[in-house]
Amino acid sequence: MSTPLLAPVMVRVCPVDELPPGRRLLIEADRLQIVITNVDGRLYAFRNVCPHQGAPLMCGPITGTMVASVPHQYEYGCDNEIVRCPLHGWEFHMATGKSVAQRDTVSIKTYPVETNEEHILIQLPRQPESFAVHTAR
Ligand code: FES
């Protein structure tokens, strides 16, 4: 007997108006927790677990970071594109999941997220057996 192929699925999260700019949702798909946030109309979805020591990224500020400009100089950039871990401050690009400081070795899992005319949809690797929107802020 062969194992069925896993195919990504788009799962309906909520009506678009339940996640206005500046808000976040925490969803649970089976046992996987995922944050979905609306930043000025741009949607991001990423796992709610920091790879350092497991802190919930749901509680981390969305910010920018210091980026290299010329040798020995940094300037503020990537405004509202970074989530910072609330525990020790590791930073991640929400679009790619890559760590700001260790981009080739550390990352968080991200998920495609989009809207149709009425709902926010997230792409998951397979159809979850359970799916819930737990909190919003
Ligand atoms: S747990 Fe996230 S930086 Fe330490």
Image (cartoon, grey):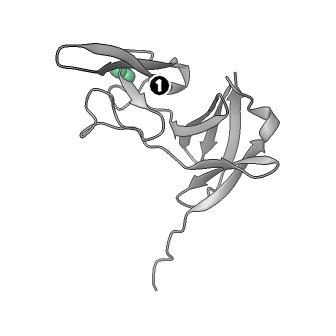
| Residue 68 spot, x, y in % from top left | 27, 21
| Residue 42 appears left or right of 93 | right
| Residue 6 appears left or right of 54 | right
Q: Is residue 92 above or below residue 133?
A: above
| Residue 113 spot, x, y in % from top left | 61, 47
Q: Write the residue at 43% across / 43% down.
A: 109
Q: Is residue 4 above or below residue 48?
A: below
Q: Write the residue at 48% across / 39% down.
A: 95
Q: Nearer the viewer, residue 130 or 62?
A: 62
Q: Which SS class for mark 1? A: strand
Check disc 1: other Cα within 10 Å, few if <14, some if 14-19, many if 20+: many
Point out the residue furthest to the left here. Answer: 71
| Residue 117 appears left or right of 63 | right
Amino acid type, callout 1: Val
Q: Is residue 11 visible?
A: yes
Q: Is residue 68 above or below residue 107?
A: above
Q: Nearer the viewer, residue 49 or 20?
A: 20
| Residue 123 spot, x, y in % from top left | 59, 54
Point out the residue furthest to the front here. Answer: 70
Q: Quadrant of ligand 1?
A: top left
| Residue 44 spot, x, y in % from top left | 57, 38
Q: Is residue 89 visible?
A: no
Q: Write the residue at 74% across / 32% down.
A: 19
Which residue position is annotated with label 1? 83
